[in-house]
Image: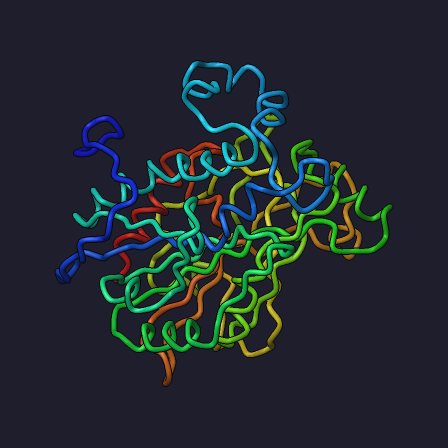
Amino acid sequence: MSLSSASRPRLYNQMLTPRKYVPGQRRISIYWTWSYPWEANQDINNLDNRFSTMAEVRRTGWPNFESIEYSEKMFLQGIAGTLELFHLGTIRFQQLAEDFTHQPVAIYQRIDQAGHRLPIDERILADTDTLMVFGLDHLVTEQEAAPEEISAIKEFLKREGTCLVLSPHHDVGASEDLKQRQMEYKHHGDPLVPRQQRFGKYTRSLMKGLGVPVENKYGLRPATLGGTNQLVPLSINKDFDKLGMLNGVSTFNFHMHLPHYEVTTNDSSLISVLARQPIDMTNPHPFIEAGNTEFNMFLWMPPNEERAGHILLADSTIFTTLFGSDDSLDRFWKNIATLK
């Protein structure tokens, strides 16, 4: 690998130098939809709809975060530290994507640590070929795509060779029934996720504006092999994978609570489910009780008469190493980074 986390200094608070267009070298940008301050400043006495603090992460993941680099001497504590874990988790994807494309991966936040607000507009889109929208904003923080942002993305998708990756996260505990919330919690089994944790108002509003017929629902635990974190292979619809995005791919990475991307149209020409993930059936869940054994994991909307670009749906956790990675995931990243 030509790039490691120690080989180049890390930039912060810098203005982007636009990346030049080079045929075959896709320029990838990641957009975190959150307001970093609003997420970090949530009252930790609230049980629901917030990220964990670093103290909660350390207690649950002990001793994984007891080294000096995660101490108060070197790392943000509270909720802010947990947000930084997501940033750290994307570094390897950035490294591999740059190796594949020979273009650096740009990272943006809707509202950053210093309160700088950056909506999606030409400042982001002009030098981007693949835009990845990571929907990790809690509904309570009221992030929503403005009409101007939706229009800008529609124009972006008129360009040949563009791709929009939408990643609305899970929606745990949407029901007012507290017994159902407890059932969902027992199903996924992650003590760091509260009984209600609803994500993705920004991405939902963007999908509505773009006419993406998908709703992110639940937080489902994927099936694994023999009590390990090795996933049961995906159910892949190879006949619909016309771009070969899942060539050489058998699994993504393990995450305890993944969204089901429910398709809300019967028009099979509009959107295709390319991969489904088998569910861990150990503990009950309303989705299981409805007769389901798999959930929709990776979807594709091909170009049409109004749009030259592709739209993909895949959870943001697939693009981080917070929950592990392997050769299959590396191959998926390469397929996405080098999409033709």
Q: Quadrant of the C terminus?
A: bottom left
Lateral position of residue 156 relative to residue 216, left or right: left
Q: Residue at x 38, y 80 (%)?
A: 304
Q: Residue at x 57, y 57 (%)?
A: 200
Residue furthest to the bottom in view is: 305
Q: Residue 271 location, x and y as percent?
A: 49, 71
Q: Residue 322 location, x and y as percent?
A: 47, 33
**Residue 16 versus residue 299: which sits nearer the camera?**
16
Q: Height in image: 226 above or below 206?
A: above
**Residue 123 versus residue 97: which sits nearer the camera?**
123
**Residue 266 versus residue 57: which sits nearer the camera?**
57
Q: Height in image: 107 above or below 237?
A: above
Q: Residue 151 location, x and y as percent?
A: 40, 78
Report the label total: 0
Q: Residue 59 location, x and y as percent?
A: 62, 20
Q: Height in image: 191 above or below 333?
A: above
Q: Quadrant of the N terminus?
A: top left
Q: Residue at x 83, y 55 (%)?
A: 176
Figure colour scheme: rainbow
Lateral position of residue 181 relative to residue 38, left or right: right
Residue 113: quarter of image: top left
